[in-house]
Image (cartoon, helix red, strand yellow):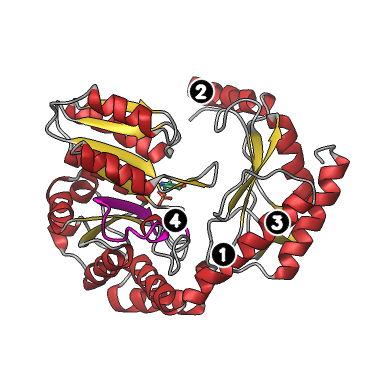
Amino acid sequence: MSLNHPFRTSLEAQITDLKEKKVYKRLNYLSSPQAAHVQMEGRGDVLILSSNNYLGLCNEPEVIEAGHEGLRKFGAGTGSVRFICGTFTVHRELEGALAQFVGCEASMTFVSCWNANEGLTATVVEEGDVVFSDELNHASIIDSMRLAKAITKCSTVVYKHSDLDDLVAKLRAHTGARRRLIWTDGVFSMEGSICKLPELLQVARDHDAILAVDDSHATGVLGRTGRGTAEHFGVLGEVDVITSTLGKALGGAAGGFVAGPAALADLLTQRSRPQLFSNALPPTVAASALAAVRYIETHPERVQQLRDNTAWFRAAITEAGFKPIPGDTPIVPIIIGETAAAIAMSDAMLAEGIFVTGFGFPVVPHGTARIRCQISAAHTRDDLEFAVGVFRRVGAKLGVI
Ligand SMILES: Cc1ncc(COP(=O)(O)O)c(C=O)c1O
């Protein structure tokens, strides 16, 4: 491509525009595993307070060794799509373990939860069906609905965040469909809040609708033994469909899954486009994820450690003068206000050795830009005390507290 090719020039103009608007994302390179502390190029040792490595399993020796073993036993690649050239036994074992872990009959894995959500929605609805979505649902659910609409001509409806009255009114306004699917995040990723699962289950039952919960930020996190939002509310086994990622608490490698009735997993194998036209999870990733599930099953104390760390940090950061959005999850958003202020705070924290990301408009509404802290079981009390100390200093310097 020549240097002044118009495509290149227009791409460069877009990048310049992002930089001018101060929404350009700079990548920070790490030369060590994801853990409480990482080695960041140009900065050295940095404490991470913005990772989904909730249980510290990214770097857990048993999880790493299982990946090595998976690589040795099954090789590197899957060779093609599962129904075309074979499915590895580790996929079957992982899918059984995941289903049991989240309280469902069966599950089907995908290369990401993004893929799982897209695979699910477009497979289970058809023309005339209606999909209802909480307004704060994750982008992967939103895009899955856009895709399903384009493929199947289903209808889509957005209800106000966690507003059951609004959902019921919208269900009543859309009767007569063969299927009505309600989609919610288990834990909303920008707020750290938990969906009203028991009430949603009741609404779904009352209105003969199906409830699908994306538990990506809840699997391994919520509930006494980390089985997610359903365990948190004591309704394990009652949710129609659960999707989740293998890329957060479950070891941090890639991957996602849909869990539900056995016939759903089978239908996804038959009809979901990512299953039919895209390779399966690499066996090494499947093996690591399986070891992560087994680890959580045998180490509930890791989940308890996460809860203890979260409670300690929430109390300490409040005591330091910040106003985190109240809640129980390890996602602790601290509202700063303007986007530029949140970014300045994030930069100042990094200069003091803490990597914690700021989010502003359009990811969150104007005026609610925030620093989103994520707590891990891998953090020690010293790590968390250090983090609160830096927050105090930087917050005072920038006039946030
Ligand atoms: C609620 C939710 N769903 C889906 C995803 C996508 O997960 P994956 O990285 O496995 O595609 C995320 C990740 O940010 C998420 O927070």
The amino acid at mark 3 is: Ala
Q: Quadrant of the C terminus?
A: top right
Give the mark nearer the N terminus: 1 vs 2. 2
Instruction: Give the spatial CA distance, label 1 vs label 4.
Output: 12 Å
Instruction: Give the spatial CA distance, label 4 vs label 3.
Output: 21 Å
- Which mark is on residue 307? 1
Q: Position of residue 57 (x, y in %)?
A: 50, 69
- Which mark is on residue 315? 3
Give the mark nearer the N terminus: 4 vs 3. 4
Kindly check if marks 3 and 1 are in contact, taking CB atoms under 8 A apart as contact: no
Instruction: Give the spatial CA distance, label 1 vs label 2.
Output: 54 Å
Kindly check if marks 1 and 2 are in contact, taking CB atoms under 8 A apart as contact: no
| Residue at which label 2 appears | 5
Q: Position of residue 214 (x, y in %)?
A: 36, 48
Majority secondary structure in the magenta region:
loop
Which of these two is toward me, 123 or 21?
123
* Disc 3 secondary structure class: helix
Q: Residue at x 75, y 33 (%)?
A: 341
Give the mark nearer the N terminus: 2 vs 4. 2
Q: Mark 1 or mark 2: which is in front?
A: 1
Which of these two is toward me, 173 or 341?
173
The amino acid at mark 1 is: Arg
Q: Would you say 200 lies left or right of 54 here?
A: left
